[in-house]
């Protein structure tokens, strides 16, 4: 049993496969949050004594997240979740009537809705990139990379201004070649912005090179990083900082509080803080930093990724051998997401409920209508066996 697993109360009485939805919070992270609350109250929640502590918490967390994303601190904004990390810079990008957005068909509904609203406000057109059809596993990653680049090349138009694509697709589990896509877009006459949803990659697989090559790289701490909900970040390119305007504005967006006589161009921070808004929960910062430190104790990002693959590949092989099961990927997955169809009369939601009665927790997805199990470094071999056996029983009944 890993030290991290042993520190998670949520894993003591269940086999948990929903890290892609929310990761369990380690006991030490909860204690760090509690200690931070207590310190703030002891100093006085709005006193001169508390501000150095608050500033230190923000600066240290920003530095740690920026390092993980391979960017300088001025390019890292703190957010509440992936959606806000995507949407706040997105709505501030410079668009003109007739510009086009290219969006993958596996994007999260929140991001898709934001792009549709953006297109309505600015008279933009949306094109769809058909990546859901790509079903190769990790052993054919180069084939997938070539296919994605070919699809993007065919889908780009002279007016494409933005490409929206997840790093790891949340439904099929396919890995997208973001760094290669970024290079491709540099050669386009318009040099479209690249927005990357990293909800399923941050905390699970190495993201440094991908984040550094994206224009907007949004992530959360509450999924694979096993931090508290309500805290995430977004790495923003220098050209977005130079060209995008603030969107939802609050005191944290401003250089100084008194802006009555300040020229508009001088009101906002020049760095990523222009996309931060107002008061947020400071104790969560200590909780996320603690979770990230615990992850690092389990090994380097590359090593953790290999351990995750070990168990996701095991589950993929077990399911692939069963009648009545159809896996979304033709080969073992590149990370910890294993999505599959179960043929028969039971709906995915019914299967989730039946497995839940045995303390086995996976989830059902709507698009495509399927089941998804997420395996992390805290997953154990016996849990993979338990889930496989339970699914086998359901396929035989």
Image (cartoon, rainbow, N blue to C red):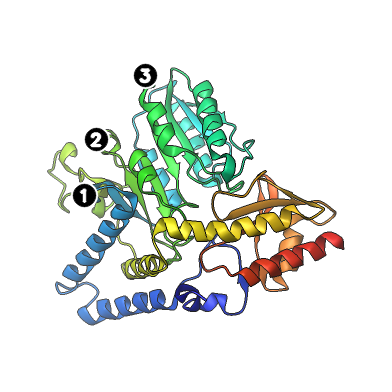
Quote the CA–CA distance across marks 3 and 2.
Answer: 19 Å
Quote the CA–CA distance across marks 3 and 1.
Answer: 34 Å
Q: At which x and y percent is residue 120?
A: 48, 31
Circle nearer the N terminus (3, 2): 3
**Mark 3 or 1: the one toward you:** 3
Q: Which residue is mark 3?
A: 189
* Residue furthest to the left: 261
Q: Residue at x 36, y 74 (%)?
A: 33
Q: Is residue 303 above or below residue 369?
A: below
Q: Is residue 44 above or below residue 190?
A: below
Q: At which x and y percent is residue 340?
A: 70, 51
* Residue furthest to the right: 397
- Quarter of the image where one finds residue 137: top right
Circle nearer the N terminus (3, 1): 3
Circle nearer the N terminus (2, 1): 2
Q: Which of 318/117 is in front?
A: 318
Classify 10 Å Cα crowding around label 2: few (below 14), some (14-19), many (20 and above): few
Q: Is residue 289 left or right of residue 251?
A: right
Residue 97 in sight: yes
Q: Which of 24/184 is in front?
A: 184
Q: Which mark is residue 179?
A: none
Q: Quadrant of the C terminus?
A: bottom right
Q: Which mark is residue 254?
A: 1
Q: At which x and y percent is residue 43?
A: 20, 79
Classify 10 Å Cα crowding around label 3: few (below 14), some (14-19), many (20 and above): few
Q: Which of 342/256 is in front?
A: 342
Is disc 3 in contact with disc 1, using a CB cutoff of under 8 Å?
Answer: no
What is the secondary structure assignment of the residue under circle 2?
helix
Q: Is residue 284 left or right of residue 341?
A: left
Q: At which x and y percent is residue 205?
A: 45, 53
**Mark 2 or 1: the one toward you:** 2
Q: Which residue is mark 2?
A: 242
């Amino acid at each position: 049993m890993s030290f991290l697993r042993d520190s998670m109360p949520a894993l003591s009485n269940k086999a948990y496969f929903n890290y892609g939805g929310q990761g369990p919070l380690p006991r030490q992270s909860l204690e760090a949050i509690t200690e931070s609350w207590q310190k703030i109250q002891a100093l006085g929640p709005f006193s001169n004594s508390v501000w150095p502590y608050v500033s230190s918490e923000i600066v240290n967390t920003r530095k740690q997240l920026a390092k993980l994303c391979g960017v300088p601190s001025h390019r890292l904004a703190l957010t509440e979740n992936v959606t806000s990390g995507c949407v706040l810079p997105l709505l501030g990008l410079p668009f003109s009537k007739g510009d086009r957005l290219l969006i993958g068909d596996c994007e999260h509904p929140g991001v898709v809705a934001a792009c549709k609203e953006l297109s309505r406000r600015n008279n933009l057109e949306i094109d769809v990139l058909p990546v859901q059809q790509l079903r190769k596993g990790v052993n054919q990653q180069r084939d997938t990379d070539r296919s994605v680049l070919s699809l993007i090349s065919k889908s780009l138009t002279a007016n494409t201004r933005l490409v929206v694509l997840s790093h790891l697709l949340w439904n099929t589990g396919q890995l997208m070649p973001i760094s290669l896509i970024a290079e491709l877009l540099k050669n386009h006459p318009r040099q479209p912005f690249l927005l990357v949803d990293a909800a399923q990659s941050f905390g699970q697989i190495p993201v440094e090179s991908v984040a550094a090559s994206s224009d907007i790289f949004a992530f959360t701490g509450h999924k694979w990083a096993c931090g508290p909900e309500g805290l995430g970040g977004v790495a923003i390119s220098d050209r977005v900082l130079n060209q995008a305007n603030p969107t939802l504005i609050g005191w944290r967006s401003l250089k100084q509080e008194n802006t009555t006589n300040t020229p508009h161009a001088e009101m906002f921070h020049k760095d990523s803080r222009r996309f931060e808004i107002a008061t947020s929960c400071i104790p969560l910062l200590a909780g996320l930093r603690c979770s990230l430190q615990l992850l690092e104790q389990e090994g380097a990002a590359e090593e953790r990724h290999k351990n995750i693959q070990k168990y996701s590949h095991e589950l993929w092989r077990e399911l692939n051998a069963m009648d009545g099961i159809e896996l979304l990927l033709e080969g073992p997955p590149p990370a910890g997401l294993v999505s599959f169809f179960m043929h028969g009369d039971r709906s995915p939601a019914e299967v989730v409920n039946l497995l839940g009665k045995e303390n086995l927790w996976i989830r059902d997805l709507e698009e495509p209508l399927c089941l998804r199990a997420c395996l992390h470094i805290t997953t154990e071999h016996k849990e993979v066996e338990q889930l496989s056996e339970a699914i086998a029983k359901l396929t035989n009944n």
